[in-house]
Image (tube, helix red, strand yellow):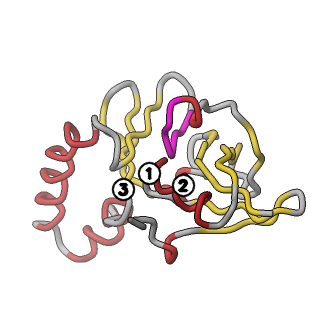
Amino acid sequence: METFNSEKLNSYRLNNQKIVTGFATYADAERYAEKFAGKVVEIAFRDGNDNPEITDDGGLIKKKLHFFVDAGPEYKFVHSSDPGFRHYADELQKIKAKIDRLSPEEKYIANAEIEIAEDPIIVLKNNHFESVTSRERSKYLKHAKVYEIAVALP
């Protein structure tokens, strides 16, 4: 069964190959690689750079994970598919309820980031809620190293 959403996939050109990213799960990447005769690889986006590098620094293939962000010991990025995400979902609901009571100016100017609804990532600093971002924006925050599972196509 095909569960990857081709509309959410991104592609890059790297070393004479097409690199496809944006998979919702590791298993989706494996199925995509099988379907299109590709190879599952790990890529990294480092220091705000939108040019991926093939790497194994994040250990995604070994752990069978699809996404991980390393922004140093004080930051933790919790992806919507991570087991711990539900723990923080209640906090997000409280914040959203508070925002809904604000005026439009306060809501959209002061708290624009909280409006990210698709593929959310919770950013914690020293285990305390800091913000909500997206997979794409996480590449540009906190000098983060973003690791994603990808498929290399010939």
For marks 2 and 3, give the CA distance.
20 Å
* Residue 78 coordinates in the image, percent (x, y): 38, 40
The residue where tag 1 is placed is 25
Label 1: few (<14), some or many (≥20) within 10 Å? some
The residue under the point 43% across, 33% down is 76
Residue type (three-letter) at the residue carrying disc 2: Ala
* Residue 144 coordinates in the image, percent (x, y): 61, 40
The answer to which image quadrant residue 2 occupies is: bottom left
Q: Which mark is residue 67?
A: none
Nearer the observer, disc 2 or disc 3? 2
Left or right of 33 in this view: 50: right
* Residue 73 coordinates in the image, percent (x, y): 51, 22
Residue type (three-letter) at the residue carrying disc 1: Thr
Label 2 vs 3, first from the N-terminus: 2
* Magenta-highlighted residues: 63-70
Label 2: few (<14), some or many (≥20) within 10 Å? many
